[in-house]
Image (cartoon, helix red, strand yellow):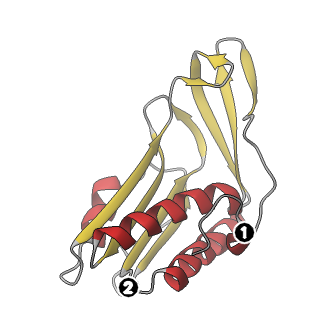
Amino acid sequence: MTSTAPREADDWLAVTEAELPVAEVMAWATAPSCGAVVTFSGTVRDHAPGRDGVISLEYEVFASQAVTQLAEVARAARSRWPEVRRIGLLHRSGVLGVGETSVVVVVAAPHRGEAFDAARFCIDTVKTSVPIWKKETWAGGSDWSECSHEIVPPDRAAGVDAR
């Protein structure tokens, strides 16, 4: 991942073990033509279904495909909401503690409706189409997340509004 915003591109796509630059990606997404910047920041919480006392998550990434799939998610969002100006999709890998940011989605658009819709589409589609898996460690042990699933292309992501 590049730790600085892309200078010419309207997509900032990355997977990294480093802390995610949440404020920087929000500032990067702000553009004079856009009246809306919607940000989703996913953080590690201290519990999961049936697993109290979660102390960490470990994200495993199929590195050679993850950024390619992030680009596909951005492309699919732009095909549904052509007025979207900037899209930032950044995800952590490695071990993260409770409270750390694991994923950031930022969408800038002229109006809030398409910004909210595209941001929701992006996070939902990242979770179903990008080859990233999480292992939870909690007071009683560790195991892969119960919400693990098959990876599907962005156009076929279940539960995602195909508009």
Q: Position of residue 64 (x, y in %)?
A: 72, 69
Picture residue at 50% right of the left edge, 82% below the top: 78
Q: Is residue 49 left or right of residue 41?
A: right
> Quadrant location of the C terminus?
bottom right
Residue furthest front in the image: 163
Q: Secondary structure at mark 1?
A: helix
Give above or below for 163 relative to 131: below
Q: Position of residue 130 (x, y in %)?
A: 68, 62
* Viewer-nearest of discs 1 and 2: 2
Tell me whether circle 1 and circle 2 mark residues in contact (CB < 8 Å): no
Amino acid under disc 1:
Ser
Disc 2 designates what residue? 83
Residue 53 sits in quarter = top right
Number of on-image labels: 2
Residue 22 sits in quarter = bottom left
Residue 157 sits in quarter = bottom right
Q: Residues within 10 Å of mark 2 (few under 14, many from 20)?
A: some
Which labelled disc corresponds to residue 64?
1
Picture residue at 29% right of the left edge, 62% below the top: 26
> N-terminal of the two: label 1 or label 2?
1
Amino acid under disc 2:
Glu
Q: Is residue 77 left or right of residue 8?
A: right
